[in-house]
Amino acid sequence: MASGGGHACSVHDGGTVRCVGAGYLGQLGNGQRQTSFSAVDVVGLPGAVDQLVLTQDSSCALVGDAVYCWGSHATVSDAGFTLESTLPLLQPELSSGVTQLTAGRHQRCALKAGEVWCWGGNEDGEVGDGLPPYIRKTPFRVPGIDAGVDAVVAGYLHTCALANGDLWCWGSNRARQIWWGTTALLLLQPLKVQGAGNDIVAVAAANRATCVLKGPEGARSVQCWGSGAVGDGLTTQNRTQPATVIGVHGNVTKLVASSDHFCALVDGELRCWGYLVGLGLGIEATPIPITAP
């Protein structure tokens, strides 16, 4: 399943997709521009969907190794850029070789043959092309990152890539979610995050914070920086240096982020920290165990 600003979609047995919620920009993919309070079938995907990502008002799917998108600022065709589409359309630059998708508020990025390709909203430079904020209409290869990218993740207004154990990020740095070593509020091109180390095995990006999983298998730890609770027991300040997450170490096998919280899999147990992860409605300053319903 995946959720956007006002809609959600799910992949079902056989790889078909259904969406529900806001559809005024075609983000439900059923050929209509209207909200639906019950799930509708996405029409026109050519095969089973392997991955699904949603932005504020668009949807994208990985079918085999090709990318199809629908909704706002999501599509291109032989005739040029289409502002919105109510049906999935192939992204020509990403018609083959894609292995991963990620999406933030309005930006979308893909991992293709070890390179990062991005397009969409660029309010704070989160597509990484070095140009002033505007809408990047078509996917392009993000320059300046070392070859051999292993993963790419999108936060709300920033994006990060992992290449050979090093972390590269770009976009909004207003909460120091990219790098604490600069006072720049926006980074329009990828920057290697100095001080994060070169032993990173996974990265996760939330609205205004970034976390990395580091170290050898069986002896790993998680470090976070940026705004809000980053798992170090404090809740009232931005972290201008990496903070080690309390109680998340050892056999850590997974690290993921939502809009305002993070979760890690530790010895097969899910532990989460940040906003709205517990029974209350506040901030969990340190990780708590989460029991599946």
Image (cartoon, helix red, strand yellow):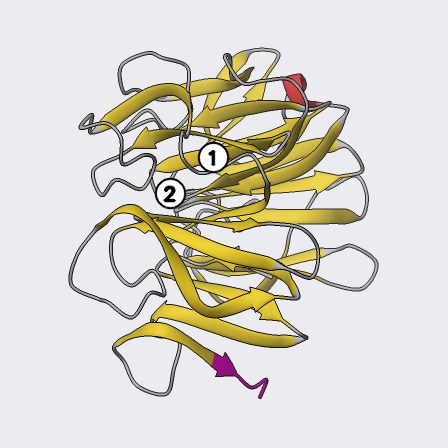
* Rendered residue at 50%/82% (across/down): 289
Front residue of 39 and 197: 197
**Dominant secondary-structure state across the stretch colored magenta:** loop
Name the residue: 49% across, 37% down: 197
Frontmost of labels 2 and 1 is 1
Q: Is residue 104 left or right of residue 18?
A: left
Q: Amino acid at mark 2?
A: Arg
> Which residue in the protein does label 2 denote?
105
Q: Which residues are magenta?
A: 289-293
> Does the rendering let one see residue 87?
no
**Circle 2 Cα neighbour tier, 10 Å, few/some/many (<14 / 14–19 / ≥20):** many
Pointer 1: residues within 10 angstroms few (<14), some, or many (20+)? many
Q: Quadrant of the N terminus?
A: bottom right
Q: Nearer the viewer, residue 15 or 275?
A: 275
Q: Is residue 93 above or below residue 240?
A: above
Residue 236: percent from left, percent from top: 15, 63
In this picture, is 12 found above or below 133? below
Give the residue type at disc 1.
Cys
In the displayed structure, does residue 193 sit left or right of residue 75? left
Q: Earlier in the sequence, mark 2 or mark 1?
A: 2
**Image position, residue 101 (x, y; %):** 61, 39
Query: Cα distance, mark 2 to mark 1?
Result: 14 Å
Describe residue 96's horizontal placement relative to residue 264 as left or right.
right
Spot occupied by residue 75 in the image (x, y as percentages of width and height): 54, 27
> Residue 140: x percent and y percent?
54, 15
Asked if one can make out residue 234 in the rendered structure from this viewpoint, the answer is yes
Q: Residue at x 68, y 23 (%)?
A: 148
Does the magenta-highlighted stretch encompass residue 282?
Answer: no
Q: Secondary structure at mark 2?
A: loop
* Residue under label 1: 160
Q: Is the C terminus in the top left, top right, bottom left or bottom right quadrant? A: bottom right
